[in-house]
Amino acid sequence: MDRLRIVLAMGVSVLLLGGAYVFEYFGYAPCTMCYWQRWPHMAAIAIGVIALLLPMRVFGYLGALAALTTAGIGIFHTGVERDWWEGPSSCTGGGDLGGLSGGDLLSLDGPRLIMCDQVSWELFSLSMASWNAVFSLIAVWLWLVAARSYR
């Protein structure tokens, strides 16, 4: 496989994951689905490292699968943010609060729940989840090109 294509494909995940951590550092706390989008990027990075050490076509396809997984989650997350469909009740406000007291609800020192259906940042009308999907689809293409370049 072409090492440059592997590095580029893996680099997309490195940049997207790094960007997520930079946003988090500057106060944009991630929601549950944001965390879900990070795991396939971590897998793609690990696959990329292995593909550089053991250049086999299968790793290109596995990298593409990891990138496609995070793109799919990003598309789903975008749909939840845009009210195209329902998201998980655990992070969209649809969960049952019956077990909490008024004091629990008003407590300022408890964990802060970040809602998955709220856009916290966007650029050109695309949220972070949308941008993740766009760039992850580019990574899918790069992984597939790398896999097909295997001789």
Image (spheres, helix red, strand yellow):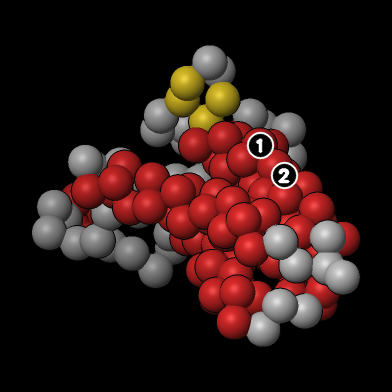
Number of residues whose C-alpha sits closer than 10 Å to that of mark 1, classed few (under 14), some (14–19) or many (20 or more):
some
* The C terminus sits in image quarter: bottom right
In the figure, 127 relative to 16: above or below? above
| Most distant residue in the top direction | 124
Q: Which is more toward the observer, 15 or 106?
A: 15
Q: Which residue is tagged 2? A: 137
| Most distant residue in the front direction | 151
Direction from residue 92 to residue 121 in the image, left or right: left
Residue visible at 59% across and 82% down in the picture: 53
Badge 1 marks a residue whose secondary structure is helix
Pointer 1 and pointer 2: residues touching (CB < 8 Å)? yes
In the figure, 72 relative to 147: above or below? above
Q: Which is more toward the observer, 122 or 16?
A: 16
Q: What's the amino acid at mark 2?
A: Leu
Q: What's the amino acid at mark 1?
A: Val
Residue visible at 52% across and 31% down in the picture: 127
Residue visible at 77% across and 79% down in the picture: 56
Q: Which residue is tagged 1? A: 134
